[in-house]
Amino acid sequence: MANTQAMCTSFKVELLNGHHALGTSVVRAGTTPDSFKAALYLASATINAATTAYTATGEVSGAGYSAGGVDLTGATDWIAPASSGTTVYSTPTANIAYTTVTLATAFDAVLIYNSTQGNKAVSVHTFGSQTITAGTLTLTMPTNDATTGLVRLA
Amino acid sequence: MLIHTTKGELPEEALEKKEGVVDNENEHTTWVEYWLGGELVHRSAHVTLKKNVSLSGQTAKFE
């Protein structure tokens, strides 16, 4: 046997589950998962890795769309973090849908953020510019595995 | 089938339907439009993201 330097895979899972606090943490009232939302952003906006929290600046607007976007849905918002090899992954439980909306100005990004923890940003996902007219935008989630899971810690 | 449009619910056969697909390394997207008299009255899109976001965990070695 030999020792191998590594970041423990269990640690990665536990990071996603909120078990470790290397810095100042937050007070949690219980063990239930946080709630998350998904907001859409105009193609002209600047939402990226530097985004720390949900912002209304650059967010889409239009009939049927509420500022802040939509809640992630499902028994839990995210599938419980799991690992394969040394990669940890998780994906929202359900597809994200904006039903019966009119979004006339082109948008090309969705920000997923934690609405329980001060709207802190989680991830930004971009796609080709879209508009919606009296219709529905559906964001279909990828297969939740170590290769395609929406959020991965490798 | 009735289609929800900017003019209310309209029968599909009364509308001109256009469909499209975008497939690249980032996404697979399908969209459908319904037009009435040259006016766009419905557009929906279905986006499947292919690229996820990942974080690479690294540890430092004691020298």
Image (cartoon, rainbow, N blue to C red):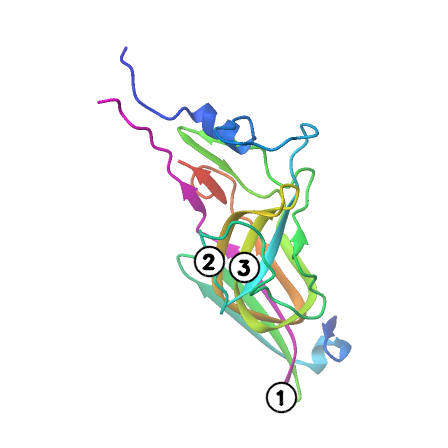
Question: What amino acid is found at the position of numbered circle 3 in the picture?
Answer: Val
For marks 3 and 1 on the same chain, the one whose residue lies earlier in the sequence:
1
Q: In which quadrant of the rendered image does the C terminus of chain B lie?
A: top left
Residue ID at (50%, 31%):
A15
Q: Which residue is mark 1?
A: B38
**Are tags 3 and 1 found on a single chain?**
yes
Q: Which residue is mark 3?
A: B47
Identify the disc placed on residue A112.
Answer: none
Residue ID at (48%, 28%):
A22
- Give the side of residue A150 with respect to residue A71, left or right: left
Asked which secondary structure carries label 3, the reply is strand
Tell me residue A7's x, y (percent): 38, 26
For marks 1 and 2 on the same chain, the one whose residue lies earlier in the sequence:
2
Q: Hey, which residue is sitting farthest left in the picture?
A: B63
Report the chain holding disc 1. B
- Please tell me how crowded label 1 is: few (under 14), some (14-19), or many (20+) other residues with Cα within 10 Å: few
Q: Is residue B21 above or below residue B8?
A: above
Q: In which quadrant of the rendered image does the N terminus of chain B lie?
A: bottom right
Question: What amino acid is found at the position of numbered circle 1 in the picture?
Answer: Gly
Q: Distance of mark 3 from mark 1, alpha carbons?
A: 26 Å
Q: Distance of mark 1 from mark 2, alpha carbons?
A: 29 Å
Tell me residue A115's x, y (percent): 65, 46
Was residue A63 drawn as part of the magenta stretch in this picture?
Answer: no
- A23 vs A82, nearest the viewer: A23
Q: Which residue is mark 2?
A: B27
Was residue B43 drawn as part of the magenta stretch in this picture?
Answer: yes
Tell me residue B39's x, y (percent): 64, 85
Specify the segment rendered in magenta: B38-63
